[in-house]
Amino acid sequence: MSAEPIRVLVTGAAGQIAYSLLYSIAKGDVFGKDQPIILILLDIPPMLPVLDGVVMELQDCALPLLKEVIPTDKVEVAFKDIDAAILVGSMPRKEGMERKDLLKANVAIFKTQGAALDKYAKKTVKVLVVGNPANTNCLIASKSAPSIPKENFSCLTRLDHNRACSQVAMRCGVSSDQVKNVIIWGNHSSTQYPDVHHAKVNLQGAETEAYQAIKDDAWLRGDFISTVQQRGAAVIKARKLSSAMSAAKAICDHMRDIWFGTKEGEFVSMGVYASGNSYNIPEDLIYSFPVQIKNSTWKVVDGLPVNDFSRAKMDATAAELVEERDTALDFLSQ
Ligand code: NAX
């Protein structure tokens, strides 16, 4: 094991997603089984005692790849020379809080963290934003870090993607690895559009269009979509806590694909910078598209046919993002 350690930052490190995530990162599931890691854990000052407990547990896992763990509440320590940033921490919605107030609080957080990326991180840093509203937080972070390429920023819609994959797999009675190329379009919110028009299911060795494999268009255009859109709320209702294990797994899938690339002939969903060239989605949004990744660089899978049903849903989620962006940019300029 001779590779130099990479520096990986996780924010919101005392929270529940991080608790499921850190072990997977530290044992090599994301950056490779022979890539030593320095983990930097950022949270807010009141959470530092909790963070100490997380550090103790990581030490107690006795993981050979984990060279150092650095807990901190200071951005100048957290973002210094990092290779990867997984921005999980954000302001949660509190009872009675208006959507606008929530957005304002998060703009402040991601403006600060974007500026810290700009000032302290490596210019090659890969940034994954998880904290909600993930798409717009990601845009704000990117705008606040002008010296880092926009392409280095992405937000998590892989959990929605995995949920869609699993729903199709369960419906077809196959394992989830037999389903590929589902797409999540747009915002990581209930307006997202889970689309299986281009998905394939491996049915006993025969690659079959998902619509053919499922043979239930009403379900695919109805309950399937709403189940994926509402899955986060359903988990909260059942668990009294939001998705954490599945979110952590999706973060690992997303970052591992950035690091090592996607499989030949397959695409995954990721919130990335919309430049106005793909699928007539307005530019200057972080919008979830189907992407393929090679040499740590994503490319939107262009040219997939889009029918009227899909078009309307892709536009509706884009419209929500435009509104969210415009409100956020007002706060950013204040
Ligand atoms: P928790 O409330 O358990 O943890 C969040 C942690 O972030 C807390 O320890 C908090 O102190 C910390 N934090 C708050 N402000 C911070 C700041 N400025 N700097 C550093 N740390 C800060 O929430 P958890 O369940 O872990 O969820 C974290 C975020 O992920 C939430 O915003 C949640 O909505 C979002 N999610 C996004 C998903 C996605 O697919 N994009 C799915 C899962 C999850 O719902």
Image (cartoon, helix red, strand yellow):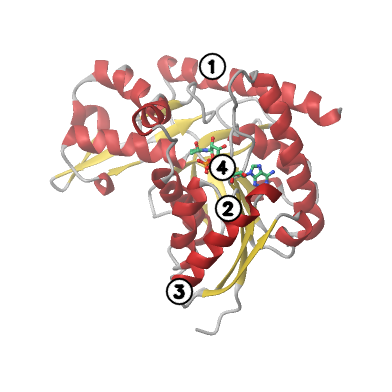
Question: Circles 1 and 3: CB distance less than 8 Å?
Answer: no
Q: Residues within 10 Å of mark 4 (few under 14, many from 20)?
A: many
Name the front one of labels 1 and 4.
4
Q: Report the side of 261 relative to 162 (left or right).
A: right
Identify the residue position indicated by label 1 in the image. Answer: 316
Identify the residue position indicated by label 2 in the image. Answer: 13
Task: Name the secondary structure under disc 1.
Answer: helix
State yes or no: Cβ of the residue under disc 2 lies below 8 Å from any atom of ligand 1: yes
For marks 2 and 4 on the same chain, the one whose residue lies earlier in the sequence: 2
For marks 3 and 4 on the same chain, the one whose residue lies earlier in the sequence: 3
For marks 3 and 2 on the same chain, the one whose residue lies earlier in the sequence: 2
Identify the residue position indicated by label 4 in the image. Answer: 130
Using the image as rendered, state which of residue 101 and residue 330 is in the foreground: 101
For marks 1 and 4 on the same chain, the one whose residue lies earlier in the sequence: 4
Task: Name the secondary structure under disc 2.
Answer: loop
Quadrant in the rendering for residue 247:
top left
Q: CA distance from mark 1 to mark 3?
A: 46 Å
Name the front one of labels 1 and 2.
2
Q: CA distance from mark 1 to mark 2?
A: 34 Å
